[in-house]
Image (spheres, rainbow, N blue to C red):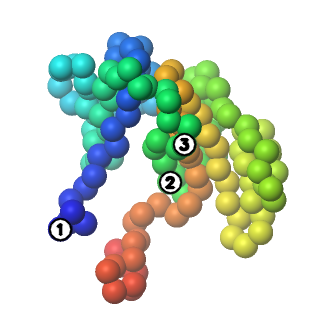
């Protein structure tokens, strides 16, 4: 079944050269080989992110990639801010904005920040627990 395989994120971009620089130099992704046939693959913590040129780049108004950072959340926001990455700010019910971070205090505290790549693809950073533990198919937590 597909659940036995690791999926990859595929992100449409307008200008592969500009996007490649952003993903490599700003976000720190490691390219897998050279750019080929209008696409560039990156290895990211054992998974793959592929960017490719498309006339439809930037038309998605929803989150394209989510990063669950756990305890590394605040440091990552600071690092990206220092590299000049602009963050998006949204007015959301029950959420307060602290700098670039959207904070929900009801229930378990949640911290979220959003930024866009050069083509407007939305990335979500959150402080959720990293997936070092995950529920198994029977609902039990495994390591």
Q: Residue at x 49, y 27 (%)?
A: 58
Q: Residue at x 33, y 29 (%)?
A: 51
Drawn side of residue 59 relative to residue 87, left or right? left
Give the residue at mark 3.
62
Place of residue 45 in the rendered image (x, y in percent of width and height, measured from the top left): 33, 46
Q: Secondary structure at mark 1?
A: loop
Mark 3 and 1 residues: CB-CB less than 8 Å, in contact?
no
Distance of label 3 from label 1 (alpha carbons): 27 Å
In the displayed structure, would residue 48 be above or below residue 38?
Answer: below
Q: Secondary structure at mark 2?
A: strand
Place of residue 113 in the rendered image (x, y in percent of width and height, measured from the top left): 64, 43
In the displayed structure, would residue 58 be above or below residue 129?
Answer: above
In the image, 25 versus 57, the foreground residue is: 57
In the image, 76 versus 6, the foreground residue is: 6
Distance of label 3 from label 2 (alpha carbons): 17 Å
The reply to whether residue 24 is in sight is: no
- Say which label, 3 or 2, has the lower sequence index: 3
In the displayed structure, would residue 103 be above or below residue 137?
Answer: above
The reply to whether residue 47 is in sight is: yes
- Residue 106's mark? none
Q: Residues within 10 Å of mark 1 (few under 14, many from 20)?
A: few
Give the residue at mark 1.
1
Q: Nearer the viewer, mark 3 or mark 2?
A: 3
Give the residue at mark 2.
68
Q: Residue at x 59, y 56 (%)?
A: 127
Drawn side of residue 67 relative to residue 89, left or right? left
Q: Residue at x 52, y 63 (%)?
A: 129
Q: Nearer the viewer, mark 2 or mark 1?
A: 1
Q: Residues within 10 Å of mark 2 (few under 14, many from 20)?
A: some
Residue 48: quadrant of the picture: top left
Mark 2 and 1 residues: CB-CB less than 8 Å, in contact?
no
Q: Secondary structure at mark 3?
A: loop
């Amino acid at each position: 079944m597909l659940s036995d395989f690791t999926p990859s994120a595929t992100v449409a971009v307008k200008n592969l050269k500009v996007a490649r620089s952003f993903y490599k130099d700003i976000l720190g992704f490691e390219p897998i080989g050279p750019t080929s046939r209008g696409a560039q693959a990156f290895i990211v913590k054992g998974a793959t992110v592929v960017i490719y040129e498309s006339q439809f780049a930037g038309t998605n108004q929803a989150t394209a990639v989510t990063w669950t950072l756990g305890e590394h959340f605040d440091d990552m926001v600071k690092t990206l801010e220092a590299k000049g990455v602009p963050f998006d700010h949204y007015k959301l019910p029950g959420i307060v904005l602290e700098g670039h971070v959207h904070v929900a205090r009801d229930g378990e505290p949640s911290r979220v920040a959003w930024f866009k790549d050069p083509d407007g693809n939305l990335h979500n950073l959150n402080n959720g627990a990293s997936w070092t533990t995950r529920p198994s198919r029977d609902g039990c937590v495994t390591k």
